[in-house]
Image (cartoon, rainbow, N blue to C red):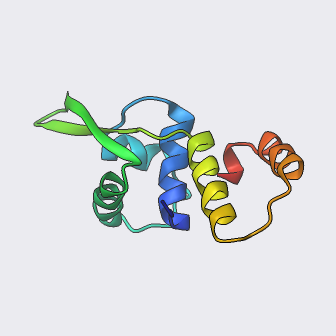
C-alpha cells in the first residue's frame, strides 16, 4: 500500500482523532489541508479501495444522515507495510534507526 502525501494528510486527521468522522468533521479538523473541498470524496473512495479506511456508520446531521469514515490501518501498521515493501525491493533498512525515527514522530510528521 502506498499513500500519497494528501492521503497521508487525511489519514493523519483520522488517526489523531481515533474515531469515525464525517467529511464535514474531517474538514473542520484540518483547516490547513492541502486538498480541495471536493477532493475528499475521491480520496476517501481511493483509501477505501486501498483498505486504509472503511465506511463505519451513518450519523444524523441537520437534514440528512452522513457517512462516517474510520481508519482501519494504524500508523504503525502503515509504517511496517512500507518498511516491508522497501526490504522486498532490496532497499537496506537499518532497523534501530528506523525505530528511533518512528518513535520521535508526532502527529505533525504524519
Q: Left or right of 78: which side holds 48?
A: left
Q: Residue at x 41, y 38 (%)?
A: 72
Q: Left or right of 87: which side holds 40?
A: left
- Quick check: 5 above or below 70? below
Query: Residue 68: x, y in percent?
Result: 28, 37
Give the image quarter of residue 91: bottom right
Q: Left or right of 92: which side holds 62?
A: left
Q: Residue at x 37, y 32 (%)?
A: 20
Query: Is 46 in front, or is 31?
Result: 46
Q: Residue at x 17, y 33 (%)?
A: 62
Q: Residue at x 51, y 33 (%)?
A: 17
Query: Residue 87: x, y in percent?
Result: 69, 62
The mark tally for this picture is 0
Query: Is 72 in front, or is 13?
Result: 72
Q: Left or right of 87: which side holds 51?
A: left
Work out which residue is located at the far left of the displayed protein and give it.
63
Give the image quarter of residue 35: bottom left
Query: Is 62 in front, or is 24?
Result: 24
Query: Residue 33: x, y in percent?
Result: 52, 60
Query: Is 31 in front, or is 70?
Result: 70
Amino acid at each position: 500500500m502506498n499513500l500519497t502525501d494528501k492521503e497521508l494528510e487525511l489519514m493523519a486527521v483520522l488517526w489523531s482523532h481515533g474515531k469515525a468522522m464525517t467529511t464535514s468533521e474531517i474538514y473542520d479538523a484540518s483547516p490547513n489541508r492541502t486538498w480541495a473541498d471536493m477532493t475528499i470524496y475521491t480520496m476517501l473512495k481511493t483509501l477505501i479501495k486501498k483498505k486504509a479506511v472503511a465506511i463505519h456508520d451513518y450519523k444524523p446531521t441537520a437534514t440528512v444522515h452522513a457517512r462516517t469514515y474510520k481508519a482501519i490501518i494504524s500508523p504503525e501498521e502503515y509504517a511496517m507495510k512500507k518498511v516491508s515493501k522497501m526490504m522486498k525491493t532490496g532497499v537496506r533498512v537499518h532497523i534501530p534507526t528506523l525505530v528511533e525515527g518512528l518513535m520521535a514522530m508526532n502527529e505533525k510528521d504524519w
